[in-house]
Amino acid sequence: MTTLDDLPIREDLRGLSPYGAPQQPVRVTINVNENPYEVPVGVQHHLQEAIARELAGLNRYPDREFTGLREKLAVYLTRELEAASDSAGGVRVVGPDQVWAANGSNEIMQQLLQAFAGPGRRVLSFSPSYSMYPLLARGVGAEFVTANRTDAFEVTPALATDAIRRERPTVTVLCTPNNPTGTGLPLETITAAYDAVVETDGILIIDEAYAEFRHAGQPSALELLGGRDRLVVSRTMSKAFAFAGARVGYLAATPALIDAVRLVRLPYHLSALTQAAASAALDCTDIMLAQVDVIRQQRDRLVLAFEEAGFRPYPSEANFVLVAGVDDPQALFEHCLERDILIRDVGIPGTIRVSAGTPVETTEFLSALAEYPGTPR
Ligand code: PMP
């Protein structure tokens, strides 16, 4: 039988492993940072009607520029900016020409890397961070380099600027809140990184996949977009918006940057069904986001419970918690799986990552944790 090794794949792909978070039916799925709440029935009906309206026209290609969806995403982002109390002086409006969407923010990242990275170019991130960055960078033939965070997984302005000046990447990616650590970035780090990126002729991507879960008063890089044409803010409907299965991610940036992405996107990459579903879901923004506060509470509950049990959770601005002090992460993973609970060993020694579930799911996990025979250290 032919194996992967027998095939003439690119040499730079040999030995790599595909993305592979375990996917198996269990009672409590808290391993991939999804929203644990189903799409509400009222929204389902609205989606059904919107999708039904597209069916007859599926013989035609969809709107390549997904104009209607971009308008709704722009409204969504503008609404968030208007609500941010500390955005005085910052950007308050995002227009449809500053928004672009794709099949998940993974595809957003891929399109950006196709346009700006590639052979002979570098992509810089600050580890530990999202496990897809190296795969996406290598997928376009770019070199992936990392710089360190502090022991608390923070990125200070000095760490960011030193790394950018040293590595001179074409693309720098900062994730905030960071996956898998939950760490938020101060705007000073982003502005400092931005200045260094301009100095070294690169672009700066801020991956805000988990932005809606940040604590009240925490800023978003959206506020910095005005006058910063090398800045891209990436978002997704997969997490807070409870829409992971629909695959919709998006970005906000200056229109010229979106012109660059148009050069590499596949024609009609967003299907008519995806556009209709995403637009309909955005019509129901308040309902779709209704559980975000409950999820935040469960996140904070996890942090407290871990502390009380003698573990060392990292502060989290996201919908998951990374916790240190786990004697044997694989053993805790197996212990939970035996109880039909799926958590994540992200490969950072002595840690495990747990997504905030519903209150019942969080209780189930905490009961399993209480039964875990290993001792915190
Ligand atoms: N960025 C980060 C930091 C993530 O954690 C994820 C999902 N795990 C993504 C991007 C991609 O999400 P999606 O493609 O569903 O938008």
Image (tube, rainbow, N blue to C red):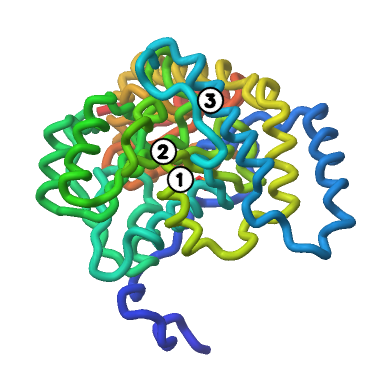
Contact? badges 3 and 1 (CB < 8 Å): no
In the depicted view, which residue is nearer to us: 217 or 81? Answer: 81
Q: Residue at x 54, y 44 (%)?
A: 249
Q: Residue at x 87, y 46 (%)?
A: 53
Which residue carries the number 3 mark? 78
| Helix, strand or loop for disc 1 | helix
Depth-wise, is mark 2 or mark 1 nearer the camera? 1
Give amino acid for label 2. Val
Give amino acid for label 3. Thr
- Kindly tell me whether residue 221 is visible in this rendering: yes
Q: Residue 131, how many percent across, how many down?
A: 37, 50
Residue 255: numbered disc: 1
Q: Residue 95, how many percent across, how many down?
A: 53, 34
The tag earlier along the polypeptide, 3 or 1, is 3
Left or right of 178 on screen, residue 73 = right
Q: Residue 85, how many percent across, how many down?
A: 43, 10
Rendered view: 100 above or below 39:
below
Crowd class of label 1 (few under 14; some 14 to 19; many from 20; radius 10 Å)? some
Residue 233: numbered disc: 2
Rendered view: 289 above or below 247:
above
Depth-wise, is mark 3 or mark 2 nearer the camera? 3
Residue 260, quarter of the rendered image: bottom left
Contact? badges 2 and 1 (CB < 8 Å): no
> Which residue is at the far top?
85
Q: Residue 133, how many percent across, how many down?
A: 36, 53
